[in-house]
Amino acid sequence: MNLQQWAERWGIPPQAFAELAACSIVEPDPDALVGGKSEAFVQSLIRLEAARAVPPCFLWRNNIGAGKLSSGSFVRWGLANDSRKLNERLKSGDLIGIRSVTVTAAMVGHRFGQFVSRECKREEWKYSGSLEENAQLAWATLINSLGGDAQIVKATGTL
């Protein structure tokens, strides 16, 4: 569905749509962008896709790391990064979020939030079985086994 079809679907008056179109809102062509195959670019595409999904999926960057503060204290950040040993076995995704899901049958009409995780890879990436990849796969397996939605992705079409 394009923007004009959406406007017609929701009864947006033609004058309002014409005014919006005059604002020159242009979506970038992914094929025309330099660096379109990088992990950062894939993350951007996944986040755009998530925001456009129905219902929308909200994804936030999950930075993971460890280091010393100016006070000398050591701190770890990011999900599943409680210790170096844990992080070697379980690596949470680059993007973490939630989407609303309406349940059917016994819980008709009730909604719950489904945990969503996306590990983004550059377009050329191929699984090699490295320790890091296995830890990322272990995370996705854990999340999916508990009813969440975790994937390792290289392109759009994953939500």
Image (spheres, rainbow, N blue to C red):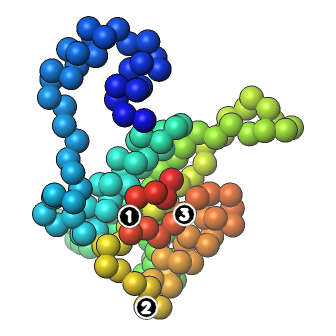
Query: Crowding near pointer 2: few (<14 within 10 Å), some, many (20+)?
Result: few
Q: Nearer the viewer, mark 1 or mark 3?
A: 1
Instruction: Give residue 148's position: percent from left, percent from top.
Output: 62, 57
> What's the amino acid at mark 2?
Ser
Give how far apart the Cα atoms at labels 1 and 2 are: 18 Å
- Residue 150 tag number: 3
Q: Earlier in the sequence, mark 1 or mark 2?
A: 2
Query: Crowding near pointer 3: few (<14 within 10 Å), some, many (20+)?
Result: many
Query: Which secondary structure, mark 2?
Result: loop
**Quadrant of the rendering where the N terminus is positioned:** top left
**Location of residue 72 (image quadrant):** bottom left
Instruction: Give residue 130's position: percent from left, percent from top.
Output: 43, 91
> What's the amino acid at mark 3?
Ala
User: Label 1, on which residue?
Assistant: 155
Instruction: Between residue 150 and residue 139, name the one nearer to us.
Output: 150
Give how far apart the Cα atoms at labels 1 and 3 are: 14 Å
